[in-house]
Amino acid sequence: MGDSALRRYYNLLGQVRGIFGAGIVAGLIYGAASGLGLPTMSKFVFPILFQDQEKIKNLPPWIMDFYQNRLGGDLQMLTFFVCLLIPLTFALRGISGFLNTYLINKTGYLILEKIRNMAFEKLQRLPMSYYHGNKSGDLLSRLTYDAEIVRSAIAQGSNDLIKQPATLLFALTFLIQESIKNESMATAFIGLLSIPLCVLPISRAGKRIAKRSREVQAQMGETSATINETLQSPLEIRVYQLEKRQQETFAGQVRSILRNLLKVVKYKSIISPSIEIVASVGFALALFLGVQRGMRLDDFLAVGMALFMAYEPIKKLGSVHALLRQGGAAAERLEHIFNAEESVGEPRKEEIQGHGEIRGNIRFHDVHFSYGDDAVLCGIDLQIAPGEMVAVVGPSGSGKTTLVNLLPRLFDPTQGVVSVDHIDLRHWSLSALRSQIAVVPQMPVLFQASIYENILVGDPTASEEDIRSAAKKAQAHEFIMSLPQGYQTIVGERGSSLSGGQRQRIAMSRAFLKNSPILILDEATSALDAESEAAVATSLSELCRNRTTLLIAHRFSTIRLAQRVVLIEHGRVLADGTFDELEKTSVEFRRLLKAAGEPH
């Protein structure tokens, strides 16, 4: 892919073309003031300041007209006005340089905002299976570090690709004008013959920069993943005394990043002096030949300034090449997100069939699902009537959670059909489908906000009275009111300030508040102690009433609430019936009862 990976992001410049265009115009003015203005100033200002009469006689007609007719031949006044050209030239150069820098940086940060929003939006559309194969820390690194490098490459690189050649062009224009007037000045072009030789160090360094940049960015992702893992697992790390291991892993990753970063710095830093050495040889040769052909020192001052302004863009373009190489490597990592397959997507408008209220008639027909080559579900056939509560049981890894996660289309089956109300889920609008499903997961995640806001997730339009009612039904109101700020208590990152049982009761409050016709309970009472579970049992029965409910549980006291029990093992349905029927007829079910210590 290389630098071509940046093409997607160049299109974003069109969305900020007004600001970017103004920045480019400022850059062109800066280039004109540098490449043409400074050499011109050197040619005309210094002879007047030092009162070189021969040079004054050869000044351009418009200057001579101003000197003789407006100033009356007053050389002192001419000197004063000419001196003003020095600060005016540098003021024009400085103001245009400032505007160029500010506007291009503004363009870059607007692009960065768009890139991050695009990537974040894409992540929201990707199936759950994508997250199983990608570390959250690495994805975070792509959204932050890599996006920042792409910003710099697109905005600053695009700017310099216009501004620096413009500076070079204006400098060449001055040299051509002077060569036409004075043959001895033509030797200046000999100095420019060294420019093609500058391409060699730029190209060689660029290849090495691209390689090392890829390594740095991959290592940044690994380091972010290590940090994320460490911050999310403080208990396990301390109890199992993994501090040293984590520290050694982190130190090794940082050391590797530093080593490769220094190599990137080395290759970037070598470009400028390499160009200067090559250019100095050309400059010296031009100076020598110019003197041999009668060039005077005051003539060469202006030409020397123009040559310097011609070499400077070449040095800058070398840095731009390095920047684009880095940007290309970063863009490749962002493309990993943008090119990921959206296996779960909205159906086309003409394909949408599901809308409005759901009755809750669920059908799994010959459903298969695999994570890569690992088959999880193998030909599931299951019919669930509206309002029926079905417990899905089986050993760990049997595919229970995968099965219920197909309902809200967290991913689609690799084969077969899942339907609700006789409509294939792939023909339901995602928003219409998911608005009719509530989930209480085994490990509910609370957002870093108040308890009130976390319950409000269930129904953003709910009133305070509705929220309190939902909390009471989930047996959460009492413990919430015991907290210092009650419902306004901030729960901390991922609800870290609350116990597992408290987090699950808040998740159940959300489900009560959402009041949806389909309910998924994935080990919803696993974090509750026996007393809390008994208190919630009545509320749980109320929550499930008249709703199509899929219940995953290992606690058989909870399973007994279900009207049907479906036993799954190795991704297949082994038994289907009431609790009592399976207890009598299924050896596998009795084995699960025995493993759970359940008398039978």
Image: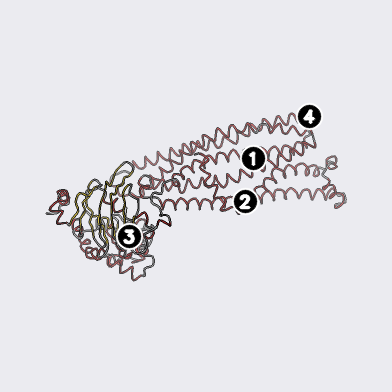
The first of marks 2 and 4 along the sequence is 2
State the residue at coordinates (54%, 53%). 110
Element on which disc 1 rests? helix
Q: CA distance from mark 1 to mark 4?
A: 28 Å
Mark 1 residue crowding within 10 angstroms, few (<14) / some (14–19) / many (20+)? many
State the residue at coordinates (36%, 68%). 462
| Residue 121 visible in the picture | yes
The amino acid pointed to by label 1 is: Pro
Left or right: where does residue 15 sit relative to residue 526? Answer: right
Q: Which mark is residue 293?
A: 4
Q: Which numbered disc, 2 or 3, marks the residue closer to the eye?
A: 3
Picture coordinates of residue 129, whole percent (x, y) = 35, 47
| Residue 102 visible in the picture | no
Residue receiving disc 2: 23
Residue receiving disc 3: 437
- Contact (CB < 8 A) between labels 1 and 2? no
Q: Which quadrant would the C terminus be assigned to in this image?
A: bottom left
The first of marks 3 and 4 along the sequence is 4
Q: CA distance from mark 2 to mark 3?
A: 50 Å
